[in-house]
Amino acid sequence: MTVVTDVVCPLCGSVCDDIEVEVEENKITKVIKGACAVGKSKLQGHERIKSPMIRVNGVLKECSYDEAIKKAAELLAKARRPLLYGWSSTVCEADKVGIALAEEIGGVVDNTASVCHGPSVLAIQDVGIPCCTLGQIKNRADLVIYWGSNPANAHMNHMKRYSYISKGYFLPGGKKDKKLAVVDVRETSTSKMAELFAQIEPGKDFLLFSAVRAVLMGYEDIVPDEVGGIPKEKIVTLANMIKESRFFITFFGMGVTQSRCRQNNIVNAIQTTRAGHLHTKGAIMPMRGHYNVNGFNQVCTWETGYPFAVDFSRGFAWYNPGETASTDLLGRGECDVALIIASDPASHFPADAVKHLARIPVIIIDPYHNPTTEFADIVIPSAICGIEAEGSVYRMDNVPIRVRKVVNTDYMSDEEIVERILEEVRAIKEKEGE
Ligand code: SF4
């Protein structure tokens, strides 16, 4: 038995990197410390896809990696409007090759930000963002605000490692030195711990940000008696908590990005943070979900100039979410072949998009079965990044972290699979050119 330290959890955007595990006979047998319950479950693994498969007469039949990769390349090379979607639960190295593949075949490349924090990305492009690292938050933030997010259930180590419960250099007493405020549409495990909980009516976040911003800017008199179901008194209390803090942080989740007003909510949230700067220091940060959803946006921006939903059909990178996002393409029934990697759109996309996906040839690359594999035509199992393959990922605060390879595997990595598909596509095109 070997103890491996500094293992990185490849699950959520917190990217906890101080995990200790026991490895016996090339298997993680125990998570000693550092991981939350869901992180432990991911690290210890569950039922895997055993072999590559191709659907023949409606039934998935096992095949070799070579056969699956060749067939996938043939489908993609002849596609007229291919979509390459996912990329958030794999490493930046695979993302980079995926973007090259999209360019080669004139496809659309998009990641899961499209259906989670895409509005945050659009807002940041509009007005910028006062941000910082999670380390700064741990050491300095004496007021933590979670708005439309519930880390106690969704990012279980977040408060303990980086925010309300963590002990910091300037806040040695941990939560004794800090205040917690929560804005959400319902009571949650996080809101139960908060000093101030504002239970907002669904879809009213924009109004509440405006009201807090008005108070911070000295216009308390124009705020009505109630905004989004929150009494004025509570709004003034929240604004005063911000004014009196030495450093505040607002973490916002999909409760804000995917409700009415979408990116405009985030623009307003960012401007509210700036209004707080009239009184004190503070920052704002999206609670990114998948461990490398942020990494794809980084890599895609280096490679194409745009963070997601990039369309290469014109022969150059074209970006217009609302037209070029995966759900737009599928909703319009345009896409004729889809490569899905490290994600499960069948569980998360709108019904009309999933229906179209089920009608066209789908190639999926993933370590595990999920609802998308149920109708996929080519299934290619891959090594689990952070456990069986190494690579670079970006934490929710834009800090790059190297995930480790802890055990050996016969599965190919995502990067190798996509690289092989790209080589095959280039060979097919070269042959066609002759
Ligand atoms: S908080 Fe997220 S990254 Fe950390 S152990 Fe849990 S699932 Fe993994």
Image (cartoon, rainbow, N blue to C red):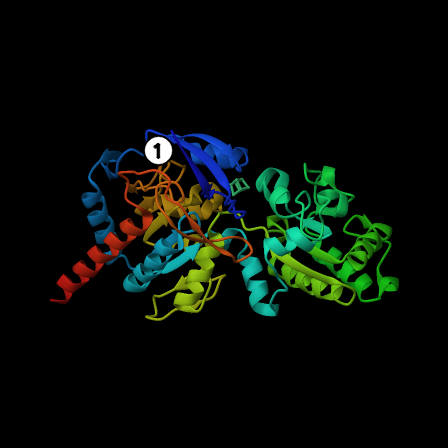
| 227 up-or-down from 185: above or below | below
Ligand 1 under 8 Å from disc 1 Cβ: no
**Residue at 60% of width from left, 53% of height from top?**
134
Kindly identify the amino acid type of the residue bearing the numbered disc 1.
Arg
**Residue at 35% of width from left, 33% of height from top?**
48
| 174 up-or-down from 241: above or below | above
**Residue at 72% of width from left, 40% of height from top?**
191
| 240 up-or-down from 19: above or below | below
Q: How far across and how far down the image is residue 311, in percent?
A: 39, 64
Of all residues, the one furthest to the left in this rendering is 434
195 and 112: which one is in front?
A: 195
Secondary structure under the numbered disc 1 in the rendered image = loop
Q: How far across and how far down the image is residue 301, in percent?
A: 44, 65
**Residue at 58% of width from left, 64% of height from top?**
124
For residue 415, say whether it is visible: yes
258 and 193: which one is in front?
A: 193
Q: How far across and how far down the image is residue 346, in percent?
A: 43, 42
| Circle 1 Cα neighbour tier, 10 Å, few/some/many (<14 / 14–19 / ≥20) | few
Instruction: Name the quadrant of the C terminus.
Output: bottom left
Instruction: Name the quadrant of the N terminus.
Output: top left
Label 1: which residue? 48
| Count of all numbered marks drawn on residues in the image | 1
For residue 334, say whether it is visible: no
Left or right, 257 with reference to 214: left
Of all residues, the one furthest to the right in this rendering is 221
Image quarter for residue 120? bottom right
Left or right, 330 with reference to 51: right
Image quarter for residue 53? top left
Q: How far across and how far down the image is residue 348, in percent?
A: 48, 44
